[in-house]
Image: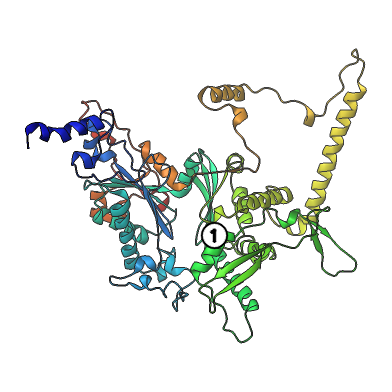
Amino acid sequence: MSAAAERKPSAALNRSTRGTTPRLADLGESPRTPTPLLRSISSTFGSPGGSFRTEDDYVVIELGARFVRGGFPGENAPRCTLPFGPDEQRRVGDYRQWDPEYAQKRRRRKQGLDWGQEQELYRMDLSRVDLGLVEDKFERAMREAYGRYFLLDTKPRRILLAMPPRMPHALMSTLLDVLFTSFQAPSITLMSTPILAAVAAGLRSALVVDIGWAETVVTAVCEYREVHERRSVRAGKRLSEDMAKLLNTELDEDAEQGAPKADVSFDEAEEVLTRVGWCRPNPRSNRRTVYFPAREAPVLEEFEDAVESPPPTITIPFPKHTPPTELKVPLASLAKPTENALFAPELALSDFDDEDLPLHHLIYRTLVQLPVDVRRLCMSRIVITGGVSSLPGLKTRILKELEVLVQSNGWDPVKSYGKASAWREEKLRNKREDLEMRKQEGEDTVSLSLDPNDPPPPIPAALQEHDEDMIDTKFAQLAVRTGPPPASVVGGVIRGVETLGAWAGASLVAQQRIKGIVEIERERYLKDGLHGASREKEASFIAQRQSMGPGLAAKGGERASWTLGVWA
């Protein structure tokens, strides 16, 4: 073959691909590994010196009772959310999930285990928790996150760990051991999830209601500081169990006589609760009670001109039931587990203890215990978060129930005055009547004064305008100059604020390189463990300053001691 003939294919290739991008197959190159989904490209097009600043590289991790979320700073969503369940705890060689009949079998709960215990990573009560098993579960989840989702190189990275407040020290030590020894993290910054939820909502002060799995935590945050906290065991675990009881009752009523009792598994109850579970948005205290003489029980009417129609029903398939069946459930009955588990309207307030309060009473008592200025800020910035908060109608119901409590009880922390109750009610009634009479007299006096030559009538002191305070005026001017105008600061009303979640707040904090109160260095932790922390809940430090060139940092910025903050 001549040289001209040998050059024809290459010439034809050049003519056909002129002005376009040639394909890899035409050029004879091997395909490259594609960029992972949502992979950040800031490191590719960043500054050349960014690869040498390993102390600025962070990994953001949020830890919950049933999940672990992980990702990188500056991103709006985590790269992965890894749950803990029986499927994630299989041993090597366990191939039951590939059996066609395994998917059609209902999983039975093991004897001695509580509802949903196999789906939990840890519990606050460590008397029945195997810390070795917790360590293995957490290490396996983190290895999956690093190897499958993060796709990082071998250099160590700092970790920002978002954790619930008041976590036991033994459990904290177990989790920190995994991160320091197995993943060689140079330092770990601990952040409280209520603070991060407020940051993700764009707030400095808020009342964070975290409706989690095992408990509901109400935390008052003022200027990024936790000032008060209350807890209740009414949360997602009780809600899921009540939904399973409702489904078991409906299945037993629909089954034939002599059939075995239904036993809905955790996965089935969780799926029904996630898909069709809801909450009534209006509290029962806002309804009108109408009594009919021919009926013994009262009838609740919400609308006078409502047209009677058959209640809607939902068809729920149960393929794992014996035999497989489809259950028709009224839509209204699917809201009963939420009311019984989170609000308990049928019980009196005296039937609850301090750790079993309904959610609206828990929030109300938290607000009552706050100082007046902190309460004014927090009651207008109620942030409802957690896994159960996404239930339709739940946030609206909580805010309306809270408004009813505030209107009926006020902000008096004393619940019972004993023998002086009647005297106090009479005194308050007389005070209201006196105030109304003074207002009417002031209006009548002003309206009768029509002659401009007449002297102005005396105005009661309660209706007179206050003198201008120079100090308040100066503070108002400073607030306009340094921050938002006073008119935009809402306070004194019940209002809810949406948040992006604790992980989004942690991502924002890590991207801004904000130093937290709790920063644990690897060398100090491996030397003394949690016992090396000081007893102070806050540690002061000097800001870092570079006065000896870009490559040298002053040693004055390093902390002499470290603290555990709210976990102390």
**Which quadrant holds residue 465?**
top right
> Is residue 257 depicted above or below 226 in this figure?
below
Can see residue 234?
no
Residue 152 percent location from the top left of the image: 26, 47
Q: Which residue is mark 1?
A: 274
Can see residue 348?
yes
Q: Residue furthest top?
A: 453
The residue drawn where x is 23% and y is 49% is 523
Figure quadrant of the N terminus: top left
Residue 68 percent location from the top left of the image: 39, 55
Q: How many marks?
A: 1
Q: Residue furthest bottom?
A: 258
> Is residue 259 depicted above or below 152 in this figure?
below
The residue drawn where x is 33% and y is 43% is 39
Secondary structure beneath label 1: helix
Q: Nearer the viewer, residue 370 or 377?
A: 377
Name the image colouring.
rainbow
Q: Nearer the viewer, residue 154 or 122?
A: 154
Mark 1, other Cα within 10 Å: few <14 / some 14–19 / many ≥20 = some
Residue 167 percent location from the top left of the image: 42, 57
Q: Nearer the viewer, residue 310 or 466?
A: 310
Q: Looking at numbered disc 1 in the image, what kind of residue is underneath it?
A: Thr
Residue 271 percent location from the top left of the image: 52, 63
Left or right relative to 142: residue 210: right
Q: Nearer the viewer, residue 4 or 528?
A: 4
